[in-house]
Image (cartoon, helix red, strand yellow):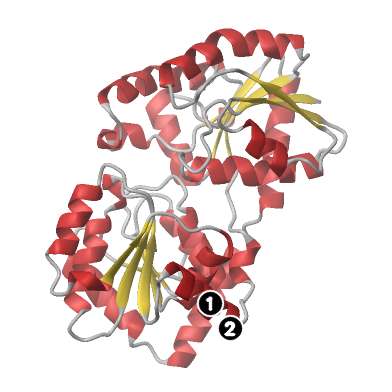
């Protein structure tokens, strides 16, 4: 099978969870599908990064399109006009678009990944033009593709309802946490990394770009209820987005704003160290197609306080604690209970969460994705 992969949406370090999804799934796909060929249609922003990611796989080819993905209009035009021609010349059996949109017309069968339909329930995360183009292009991609891939049963239900698709045209391919989050760093290494990023224990942690639906201001307000009784700081890791003003206001209203540590980006061992050393991980989101940071914290052995919204119960089951995202007092009460939990009970619960997280793997993600792509390709005609 010759699989085309439309990566034109990807701007490294800018598109959030969809980048992790693509860059972790591709190596697993290439490794599992040694008899298949993967042709990546890249852009100026991501070509070098993806070549480096996949240098070890001789069954991966690259075709770079000369577009800057930061220019949404240029990217859409390339996707609609040039990409189908390139796919035809490359002899593609199926074109997979992991970033929500596809060409309207393509000479081969298509599969598209729609990770969620958050743009419908939380349109404030986008600018006006982005909302308009998304509302046109995403439903079109769903209709034009043989199969739609998504990340959770929650997202499957949302897609069915939004686009009127029958269940048999949607496949769920859950994500996984990097196993590195679960490998305990030596204490000296952890201390050094924490010093490097300026995060000192004891602290609570949240990892999320500050979109409004991520609800980070509730985490900060809940932290404010705890400041008098606990010595902890709150580390907020994620890039500023449209919810940043609300986050800043919440921080300014705290009894001690200096105890909030804002870090826009951490990667590799530094992020692992920050997860592993946290006394609790807070995730007050109102909407998630998947919610990968929750799985990362579970893998790291860190107690999680999340919300019983969207896909999050699918990840945490009964191994994490849940709190009301609309009530900072109630959220703070759950965090307080977690922080004062007896050590043995804490260890047992964290171990159960770690075991649950281990049932998610990128090998499984790749296997489910490959099966869906093969099905889409075989349905030609």
Q: Name the residue beneath numbered marker 1.
A: 192
Question: Label 1: how many residues lie within 10 Å, few (<14), some (14-19) or many (20+)?
Answer: few
Is 35 placed left or right of 297 in the picture?
right
Residue 227 is tagged as none
Where is 305 relative to 85, above or below?
below
- Residue 154 x, y percent position in the rendering: 44, 45
Is 159 placed left or right of 183 in the picture?
left
- Residue at figure coordinates x 49%, y 28% from the top left: 100
Residue 188 is tagged as 2
The answer to which of 167 and 317 lies nearer the viewer is 317
Is 306 placed left or right of 225 in the picture?
right
Q: How many numbered callouts? A: 2
Q: Are marks 1 and 2 in contact (CB under 8 Å)?
A: yes
Where is 346 relative to 132, above or below?
below
> Where, quadrant-wise, is the C terminus in this rendering?
top right
Where is 324 relative to 122, above or below?
below
Query: Is residue 149 visible to the viewer in this orientation of the structure?
Result: yes
Where is 71 relative to 177, above or below?
above
Q: Quadrant of residue 247?
A: bottom left
> Where, quadrant-wise, is the N terminus in this rendering?
top right
- Residue 40 x, y percent position in the rendering: 69, 27
The answer to which of 232 and 287 lies nearer the viewer is 232
- Residue 96 x, y percent position in the rendering: 64, 26
- Residue 274 x, y percent position in the rendering: 47, 70
C-alpha separation, residue under disc 1 versus residue under disc 2: 6 Å
Question: Label 2: how many residues lie within 10 Å, few (<14), some (14-19) or many (20+)?
Answer: few
The answer to which of 86 and 381 lies nearer the viewer is 86
Of helix, strand and loop, which one carries label 1?
Answer: helix
Is 97 placed left or right of 62 in the picture?
left
- Residue at figure coordinates x 36%, y 77% from the top left: 203
């Amino acid at each position: 099978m010759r699989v085309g992969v439309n990566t034109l949406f990807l701007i490294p370090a800018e598109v959030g969870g969809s980048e992790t999804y693509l860059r972790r799934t591709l190596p697993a796909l290439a490794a599992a599908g040694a008899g298949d060929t993967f042709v990546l249609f890249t852009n100026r922003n991501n070509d070098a990064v993806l070549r480096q990611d996949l240098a070890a796989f001789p069954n991966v080819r690259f075709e770079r399109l000369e577009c800057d993905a930061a220019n949404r209009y240029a990217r859409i035009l390339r996707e609609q006009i040039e990409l189908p021609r390139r796919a035809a010349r490359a002899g593609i059996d199926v074109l997979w678009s992991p970033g929500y949109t596809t060409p309207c017309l393509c000479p081969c069968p298509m599969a598209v990944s729609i990770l969620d339909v958050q743009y419908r329930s939380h349109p404030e995360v986008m600018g006006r033009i982005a909302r308009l183009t998304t509302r046109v292009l995403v439903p079109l991609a769903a209709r034009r593709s043989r199969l739609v891939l998504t990340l959770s049963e929650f997202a499957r239900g949302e897609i069915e309802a939004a686009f009127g698709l029958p269940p048999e045209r949607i496949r769920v391919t859950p994500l996984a946490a990097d196993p590195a989050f679960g490998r305990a760093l030596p204490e000296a290494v952890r201390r050094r990394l924490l010093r490097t990023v300026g995060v000192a224990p004891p602290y609570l942690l949240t990892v999320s770009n500050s979109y409004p639906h991520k609800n980070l201001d509730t985490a900060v307000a809940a932290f404010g209820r705890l400041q008098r009784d606990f010595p902890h700081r709150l580390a907020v890791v994620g890039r500023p987005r449209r919810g940043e003003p609300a986050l800043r206001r919440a921080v300014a209203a705290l009894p001690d704003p200096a105890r909030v540590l804002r870090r826009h980006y951490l990667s590799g061992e530094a992020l692992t160290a920050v997860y592993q050393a946290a006394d609790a991980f807070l995730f007050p989101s109102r909407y998630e197609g998947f919610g990968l940071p929750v799985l990362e914290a579970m893998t790291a052995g860190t107690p999680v306080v999340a919300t019983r919204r969207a896909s999050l119960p699918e990840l945490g089951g009964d191994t994490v604690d849940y709190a009301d995202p609309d009530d900072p007092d109630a959220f703070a009460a759950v965090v307080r209970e977690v922080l004062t939990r007896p050590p043995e009970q804490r260890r047992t619960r964290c171990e159960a969460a770690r075991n649950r997280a281990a049932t998610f793997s990128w090998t499984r993600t790749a296997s489910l994705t490959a099966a869906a792509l093969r099905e889409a390709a075989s349905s030609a005609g």
